[in-house]
Image (cartoon, grey):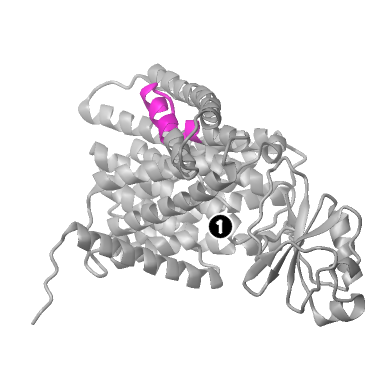
Amino acid sequence: MFLIITFTIEFFLLFLSVLFFISLLASRAGSRFGIPVLLLFLGVGMLFGVDGLGFDFHDYKIAQAIGPLALCIILFSGGMSTKFHEIKPIAKQGGILATVGVLLTALITGLFIYYVANHWIPGVQLTLLESLLLASVMSSTDSASVFSILRNKGVALKHRLRPLLELESGSNDPMAYMLTIIFIGMISSSQTGAGIDIPHVIIDFFLQLIVGSVVGILLGKGSIWVMNKIQLSNDSLYSLLLFACCVFIFSVTYYLKGNGYLAVYIGGLIIGNAKFVHKRSSLKIFEGLTWFSQIIMFLTLGLLVNPSELWPVAGVSILIAAFLILFGRPVSVFISLLPFRRMAVRDKFYVSWVGLRGAVPIIFAIFPLAAGVNNADLIFNIVFFITLVSLLVQGTTVTQMAQWLGLTRNPKGEDALKYFDVEFSDEIKSSMTEITITENILANHGNRLMDLPLPDQTLAVMVKRDNSYFIPKGKTELQKKDRLLIITNDEGALIETYKNLGISNYTLRRN
């Protein structure tokens, strides 16, 4: 007796849940070996595809619908998690990299692709416009990859490099998107014999930037007003309201002929740096939605490609990837940052190295397929292969490269709390940490809380004993393995507390 499975909505949900479960297990195992989580999501999607377990998924329209929505959520979340005080000192550098840097990367790499495709690689023929389109599709660094790798690996960088990289990756997709659309339009015009209106292209380019920026600012501020004025019956609904604001900003900008990706990033930046009701819980839930979007997006893109179709383009893809990583991206970064002479060469080199490609280039590579551009299949497969190379080569060496260049700093004092789920508003300047009561502490200072040598303006506000929590008093008797939550507005006092208690290995939590 054989088990016959028919494709129903229940089977689809079962398949999706299994896919998610395997992806999460793979990400946990991969983090131990320094493999980017998003690369594993792509790998799981490919494993379940036609060349793997046989799931046939080739609906580019579905992928084209999922991709922009997921990217919209990721950019919005990235904007909300970026602080004004962090990006203000590097706003000019980030803005230039997100615009001039992307343009230079597309032009330099596009010319190389055109030369290689017509002189070095037999069987690969691309026109100049097709070469520039291919380069434009992968000209921006991927925000999902950069945010994920820098934050999950806990890379502590010097010289404000982390906010610079996050600002660039979060704001450079609009430029790559517009270049992609422009070259698709130019190729389509050349295929139909219609002329190319260069002045119109330039005007439309700047119009999208201006409209996207203005709408992002205005609707971002409007969203804050709505969040604070509306009174919802359930606190959990505010996270859904935040999601609605994100989609609304993107959609309105689209119909106003602006760049929606730029608008949602700016809108998220405005909202994340403002005060609104239930902000902490809403951001926590939205962070989970962001991860859900990334997983869905990378799994979908993994299912979309057939590994057997990648091998014929492996040679040209590796050649282009090597040029992009070692020459195209570094040259564009160094030229873009020429006005900033105080920025060290090693900083610029590291910015060049973290030019990760991810889901965004693959999503943009779907646009030529939908538009019926010649060699669209070839462009898609090359972009997918280059993305794999970038995540594998650059994504796995982010920390090592920073250490080699001497750009890592001691992250002591920045670890998250493990046993207490406590968070303060950004406006509250405080430091907090956890202390585990040991036999040595009890022997040297006694077993009452009041006996501990805590400096002024330093309080033990909560105790975790086994699986219970309670607020202690001065006469509270402490036991071995009790965990104390210590809070103060003076970080130096926390360090003094550790020294007084004889604790050498300590962590702090800054707010």
Q: Is residue 450 left or right of residue 320?
A: right
Residue 255 is one of the magenta-drawn residues: yes
Vertical placement of residue 500 versus 174, above or below: below
Q: How many marks?
A: 1
Q: Quadrant of residue 302?
A: bottom left
Q: In this orientation, does residue 392 appear?
A: yes
Towards the viewer: 170 or 352: 170
Residue density around tag 1, few if under 14, some if 14–19, many if 20 or more, within 10 Å: many
Secondary structure at numbered mark 1: helix
- Which of the 4 quarters of the picture holds residue 79? top right
In the rendered structure, which amino acid carries the disc numbered 1? Ile
296 versus 436 height, above or below = above
Q: Main secondary structure of the magenta part?
A: helix
- The part of the chain drawn in magenta is 247-264
Q: At which x and y percent is residue 455?
A: 91, 59
Residue picked out by circle 1: 149
